[in-house]
Amino acid sequence: MPDKKNVTESEHARRVREMFAGIANRYDLLNHLLSGNTDKRWRRLVAKRLHETLSEEGARILDVACGTGDLSLALAKGTGARVVGTDFCRPMLQIAASKAQTNDFSEIPFVEGDALSLPFADGSFDAVTIAFGLRNLASVEGGLKELWRVLKPGGRVAILEFSTPIVPGFRALFRFYFTRVLPRIGGMISGSRGAYEYLPDSVSRFPDQKRLAQMMSEAGFEEIEYQNLTGGVAALHLGTRTR
Ligand SMILES: C[S@@+](CC[C@H](N)C(=O)[O-])C[C@H]1O[C@@H](n2cnc3c(N)ncnc32)[C@H](O)[C@@H]1O
């Protein structure tokens, strides 16, 4: 399983891509099951917080590390926004494309691309989102810089990611669920226990709410704010490329 410590960036990327390819077919089912459908609510909140931008005439939105496309679809739903999804794992993108087709969103293009070297010109999008993707990148700093690069000045970024629960007792309880219960269920249903051991492992290495806000600032974002979700199990960070 991916381990950031002793591998090169390309080896890390290869392992992450293979891991998601291996669980792609069960990814949605497990997401909804293991979170009790809370993940859907979190993604709808991203769309709600970006509603002003999404409703602008001809708004262009990029959903990075879109996976099976749930956030891409939530962003397009009820808005005129022209959403593009991108991910570097083809089996995840294939599921996204067929889901879009079934839900009458066949106009959403799903493009193969690496979040650390996005196949889009500077200043292309009015908003950029990444949900549960940033923590998987070989470089969080590099990912943030790419998100900033493809945004238009005035454009908004939304980062949805697992984070650090704020209440200590709940934090301990959640850690137990995340490290002991979730890998068993995830392993049983997906056939890849490693992928569901990697999940808590990657979250434990990921910066907490305040540190991520600081890293966004270092990458050039301004007007940064964040909202804890479900007691800090996840957090939604928002920012703007002002210039
Ligand atoms: C946990 S899934 C999240 C998918 C989706 N955004 C969601 O909310 O369900 C993480 C996704 O990030 C993608 N990913 C990881 N590293 C990537 C990279 N360097 N470039 C593009 N996609 C990447 C994986 O292929 C996977 O589809």
Image (spheres, rainbow, N blue to C red):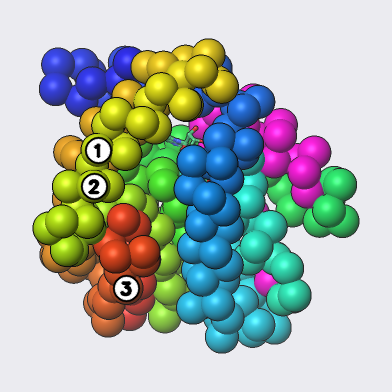
Residue where numbered disc 2 is placed: 173
Placement of 48 over or under 138, stated as above or below: below
Give the residue at x 27% y 81%: 223
Q: CA distance from mark 1 to mark 3?
A: 23 Å
Could you tell me residue 63's position as x and y percent?
A: 54, 54
- Secondary structure at badge 1 equals helix
Disc 2 marks which amino acid? Leu
Q: Residues within 10 Å of mark 1 (few under 14, many from 20)?
A: few
Q: Position of residue 157 (x, y in %)?
A: 41, 67
Q: Taking 184 as reference, is 38 left or right?
A: right
Labels 2 and 1 touching (C-beta < 8 A): yes
Q: Which residue is mark 1?
A: 176
Element on which disc 2 rests:
helix
Mark 1 or 3, nearer chain start: 1
Q: Are marks 3 and 2 in contact (CB under 8 Å)?
A: no
Numbered label attached to residue 227: 3
Q: CA distance from mark 2 to mark 1?
A: 5 Å
Residue bounds of the magenta highlight: 81-100
Give the residue type at disc 3: Gln
Q: Residues within 10 Å of mark 3 (few under 14, many from 20)?
A: some
